[in-house]
Image: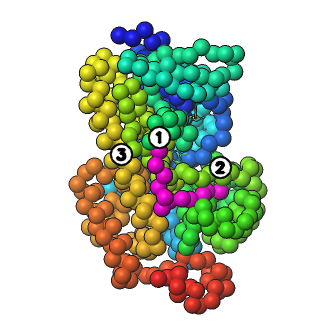
């Protein structure tokens, strides 16, 4: 038994860190969360998946979410930029659906609810305290911190969860972080008030519009506010030479499916930019540490899987550590199982994301056929079902097979993915090349 002050020190108080902290504190462990910022603070990642709902129940959060007034979300809708014929999907229709809803959240408030909940559950939370360095030994770790208090003392803990998000403190320290070179994207986004939307249940859906070399999201956050963003190759954005503000405004204006909704809207936040967000850590655990959430890896924003994976990793890392704290000999086996579970979940999204960036994906998606219940299986994966059941796995295999075939044989209508006005302006030859 070490003389460390804490059983577990958690770096970062985002969804991964606060989930782990709540569960460990409730199990009676001495837990410390070190968070660099003061909450509430802006964060991106606003559309949540229904497969997180079980975890939120376990954490006892739904009542607090209702009090915070988070908007319930019932599904999504996807369009090709070239046509106003989109596809709506509702979570209740997903294969093996557990629930018909999830949440759209303003992350500043959501993350504060989660972090306060961890503190109320018994975790010690220190905000405005940044972890600078961690030194590991055979029986624990010493965390060197920098905080608002003058010259804070280093902190001892038996185990460390790195939930520092894309900052990935231990991943960088151990040089574990590997970028996905084929996914070098940039995202530009902001909040708007007064964006037109459907009424009732359809007014809660995330709208996604897929262009030829970019895609857009519209996420309703409250009755008034909408998050709007675009994702494209970082190199393509750089070539435009435009500022983020200019680029976002012109990219939205070019898309009738978005432009028609923002005629009376007003931008109410700065325009934010995120880049270099697609990477994976080659290891997720060591003898005294685990990486959770974005610190372990992040693939792409397209399927809104980030918070789902962060909460999953928060739960799984806490469950593993809770056993290991009493039975240290089980660490190797339980950490290996943790690593397998999280990697498998990330692999599901990596495959989905790789398919998404082909034109054929959206052509097949926008032409759903009631065949072998494939659309409900795809819907389930969109909802966060990571396809552990054979029933989903084989249907997804058929779906990917169709996407591959579509490249060579037009099983579904071909789409330009260019907005109608652009199509008219682009010479015919260029449009035909884009189709190849
Ligand atoms: C453009 C874009 C759009 C996205 N959209 C969605 C979406 O719609 N839905 C979705 O689910 N996900 C989305 N995501 C992903 C989502 O933002 C993340 O996956 C999610 O926030 C990960 O949670 P986390 O707890 O791992 O990390 P974070 O939420 O990033 O939390 C990490 C915390 O660690 C703190 N920290 C960092 N370094 C230190 C340090 N040295 N010491 C102390 N504290 C530290 C940070 O201040 C931060 O509060 C999107 C991502 C991008 C880039």
Q: Mark 2 or mark 3, which has the lower sequence index?
A: 2
Return the residue at label 2.
223
Q: Residue at x 70, y 68 (%)?
A: 240
Which sits earlier in the primary sequence, circle 1 or circle 2?
1
Residue denoted by label 3: 343
Mark 1 element type: loop
Q: Residues within 10 Å of mark 1 (few under 14, many from 20)?
A: few
Residue behind mark 1: 175
**Visible in this render: residue 114?**
no
Disc 2 + disc 3, Cβ < 8 Å: no
Whether the residue under disc 3 has CB within 8 Å of ligand 1: no
The numbered mark at residue 377 is: none
**Alpha-carbon span between mark 1 and mark 3:** 18 Å
x and y, in percent, of residue 165 in the image:
53, 39
State the residue in front, 430 or 74: 430
- In this rendering, position of residue 290 left or right of residue 124: left
| Image quadrant assignment for residue 369 | bottom left
Q: Is residue 314 visible?
A: yes
Q: Is residue 84 a member of the stretch shown in magenta?
A: no
Q: Position of residue 399 (x, y in %)?
A: 33, 67
Q: Is residue 356 above or below residue 291?
A: below
How many numbered callouts? Answer: 3
Q: Residue at x 35, y 27 (%)?
A: 287
In the picture, measured across the screen, residue 159 lies left or right of residue 147, that is left
Nearest to the observer: residue 87 or residue 364: 364
The part of the image, by quadrant, that contains residue 312 is top left
- Give above or below for 162 relative to 142: below
**Above or below — where is 341 with respect to 192?**
above
- The magenta stretch spans which residues? 177-188
């Amino acid at each position: 038994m070490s003389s460390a002050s804490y059983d577990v020190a958690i770096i970062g108080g985002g969804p991964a860190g606060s989930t782990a902290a709540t569960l460990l504190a409730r199990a009676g462990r001495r837990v410390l969360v070190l968070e660099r910022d003061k909450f509430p603070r802006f964060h991106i990642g606003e559309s949540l998946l229904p497969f997180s709902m079980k975890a939120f129940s376990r954490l006892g959060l739904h009542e607090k979410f209702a009090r915070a007034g988070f908007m319930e979300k019932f599904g999504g809708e996807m369009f090709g930029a070239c046509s106003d014929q989109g596809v709506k999907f509702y979570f209740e229709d997903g294969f093996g659906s557990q629930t018909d809803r999830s949440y759209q959240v303003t992350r500043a408030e959501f993350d504060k609810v989660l972090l306060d909940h961890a503190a109320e559950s018994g975790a010690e939370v220190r905000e405005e305290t940044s972890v600078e360095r961690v030194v590991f030994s055979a029986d624990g770790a010493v965390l060197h911190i920098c905080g608002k208090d003058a010259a804070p003392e280093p902190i001892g803990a038996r185990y460390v969860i790195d939930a520092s998000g894309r900052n990935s403190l231990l991943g960088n320290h151990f040089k574990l972080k590997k970028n996905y070179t084929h996914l070098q994207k940039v995202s530009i986004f902001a909040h708007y008030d007064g964006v037109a939307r459907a009424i009732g249940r359809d007014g809660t859906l995330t709208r996604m519009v897929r262009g030829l070399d970019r895609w857009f999201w519209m996420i309703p956050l409250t009755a008034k506010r909408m998050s709007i963003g675009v994702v494209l190759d970082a190199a393509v954005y750089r070539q435009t030479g435009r500022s983020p503000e200019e680029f976002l405004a012109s990219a939205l204006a070019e898309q009738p499916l978005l432009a028609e909704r923002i005629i009376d809207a007003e931008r109410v936040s700065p325009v934010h930019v995120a880049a270099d967000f697609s990477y994976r850590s080659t290891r997720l655990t060591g003898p005294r540490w685990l990486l959770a959430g974005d610190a372990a890896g992040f693939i792409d924003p397209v399927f809104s899987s980030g918070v789902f994976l962060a909460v999953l990793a928060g739960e799984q890392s806490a469950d593993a550590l809770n056993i290991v704290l009493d039975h240290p000999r089980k660490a190797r086996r339980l950490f290996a199982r943790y690593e397998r579970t999280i990697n498998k979940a990330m692999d599901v999204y990596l495959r989905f994301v790789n398919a998404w960036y082909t034109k054929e994906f959206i052509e097949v998606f926008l032409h759903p056929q009631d065949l072998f219940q494939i659309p409900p299986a795809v819907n389930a994966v969109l909802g966060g079902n990571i396809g552990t059941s054979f029933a989903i796995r084989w249907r997804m295999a058929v779906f990917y097979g169709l996407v591959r075939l579509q490249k060579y044989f037009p099983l579904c209508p071909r789409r330009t993915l260019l907005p109608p006005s652009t199509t008219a302006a682009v010479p015919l030859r260029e449009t035909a090349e884009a189709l190849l």
